[in-house]
Structures are given as C-alpha cells and as structure tokens.
Image (cartoon, grey):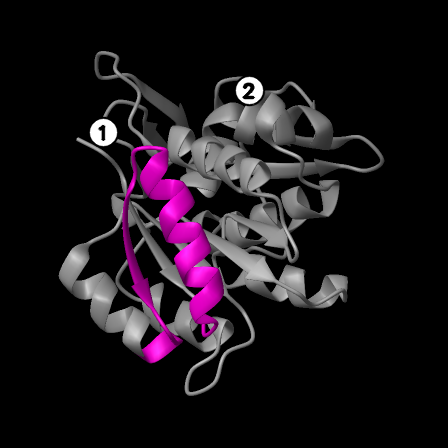
C-alpha cells in the first residue's frame, strides 16, 4: 500500500509540483493551503508523513506543529525558506523530524522522505526489549516506557534512543547518530542531534537537567549509561 504524504503550503504552485512529482513516484498525496486546513486534512486522511511549509497565513507551520504534536507522532519534514538556523532549531524542538530549505530539488526531497519513512516503519523482528533501569524500549512494537509510564516519541527520537540503548556505555558521535537516522540519504547537521537529544531527555529523564540515561560526552557525542545510580 503506497504511503500517503500530506503537503501543507500556501503556494498552489508548490503544492501542484510536489503532488505531481510524488504521485509519479508512487505516493498518494493530499494537500492543504495552511496549517488550520492541514489539521483537518490530517485528521481525515491519517497521512504517513507531512511536508510542512513554515511561513503561511492563517496558521503557520510552527503553530501547526504545536497543535499536531498533541495527538500525533506522524513524521514531519519542514519546508523552510528561512536562512536563520534558529528557526530550524525551533521546528525540531517542536517535534519535526527533518527540514528542507527552499528552493529544493525534487530528488533531494524524495531522498529525505524515504529516509524519514524508513525510520518510522517498525522493524520486522521478534519482540526485542532493551532496558536501562526503568527505561524500556521494545523494537518490535516501538513502545517506550519509563517506570511503567508510556512515553510517546517521534520516529527520529525512537531511532536515536534505540541506537544509544543498543550500545550501552559506548559513546556514539553525532555523525554516527546522523547516519542512523537516514543512512547515506540523510544530509543533516550535527546540531539536529543535539535538539533531538534535548527533546528525548524531556520525555524520558526524571530530571532532564541531570540526565541519568542519556549522557553527554563533551566534544564527542552521547552514550546510554550501562550502570545507573541507585
């Protein structure tokens, strides 16, 4: 069954271009002209991925993310014409999985879509739990819990946590974690990892300011603690 992509952009020409290209690549495409309409379409169509313009009237991309992430973990790729890195970081902090800067090439966009969709699909393997203290991650069901409290993660956050928990005590560089997110198709920046880790800590750490599970190794990267304090 083809993946359904929701494109939210206030420019009809962009919506038409993306719809035609992705349809030719075998995707099902639905569209909306602003964030408010996008919420309605997303509720009705349940897309597998959202392509989201940032600068739109009525409801911009950031406000859409604030509303959408209350109930959905569907992966989101931002389409942004803004040059300021701060805007990209804000989008990632709100739960976006990736971003593409306008103007973008369609081949690049498809590569990003494929990378994000790959990491949002559950791995075909027997039930396989990873544990670190009260933190539990099940790779087959993609469920995560802390002290029996269910934690809702985006696909990117899940993949990063899985990578760290699969290698307890081992330091993974930001470059290695970027590679885990998308392989050769992912052309992200290392700052992206820092934002995702910050979001992860807010969700799984008892005290995000003093992380016990996801530890920073300054100048290198991150690791999952293989021993935890009592």
* Residue 13, magenta (yes or no): yes
Look at the numbered discs 1 and 2 and tell me whether their residues touch, using CB distance below 8 Å.
no
**SS at circle 1:** loop
* Residue ID for mark 1: 141
Q: Is residue 222 above or below residue 194?
A: above
- The label nearer to you, 1 versus 2, is 1
Q: Residue at x 20, y 54 (%)?
A: 46
- Vertical placement of residue 149 versus 70, above or below: above
Q: What's the distance in space between the residues labelled 1 and 2, CA to CA?
A: 21 Å
Residue tagged by mark 2? 168
Residue neighbourhood size for the residue with mark 2, other residues' Cα within 10 Å, grouped as few (<14), some (14–19), many (≥20): some
Q: Quadrant of the N terminus?
A: top left
Q: Quadrant of residue 133?
A: top left
The tag on residue 11 is none
Query: Outermost residue, top direction?
Result: 126
Earlier in the chain: of badge 1 and badge 2, it is 1
For this orientation, the residue located farthest to the bottom is 58
Nearer to me, 85 or 100: 100
Which residue is pictured at 18% across the width and 64% down the height?
Answer: 43
Q: Residue furthest right?
A: 219
Magenta segment range?
9-36
**Quarter assignment of residue 143:** top left
């Amino acid at each position: 069954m083809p993946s359904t992509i929701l494109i939210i952009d206030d420019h009809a020409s962009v919506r038409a271009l993306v719809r035609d290209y992705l349809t030719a690549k075998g995707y099902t495409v639905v569209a909306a002209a602003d964030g408010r309409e996008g919420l309605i379409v997303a509720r009705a169509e349940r897309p597998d991925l959202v392509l989201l313009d940032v600068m739109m009237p009525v409801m911009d991309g950031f406000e859409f993310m604030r509303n959408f992430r209350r109930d959905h973990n569907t992966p989101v790729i931002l389409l942004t014409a803004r040059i300021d890195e701060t805007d990209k970081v804000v989008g990632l902090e709100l739960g976006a999985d990736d971003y593409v800067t306008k103007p973008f090439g369609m081949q690049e966009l498809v590569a990003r879509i494929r990378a994000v969709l790959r990491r949002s699909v559950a791995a075909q393997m027997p039930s396989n739990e990873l544990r670190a203290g009260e933190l539990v991650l099940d790779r087959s069901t993609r469920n995560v819990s802390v002290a029996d409290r269910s934690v809702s993660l985006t696909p990117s956050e899940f993949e990063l946590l899985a990578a760290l928990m699969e290698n307890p005590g081992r330091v993974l560089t930001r470059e290695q974690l970027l590679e885990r997110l998308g392989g050769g198709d992912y052309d992200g920046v290392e700052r992206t990892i820092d934002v995702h880790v910050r979001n992860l800590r807010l969700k799984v750490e008892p005290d995000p300011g003093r992380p016990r599970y996801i530890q920073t190794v300054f100048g290198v990267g991150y690791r999952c603690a293989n021993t935890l304090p009592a």
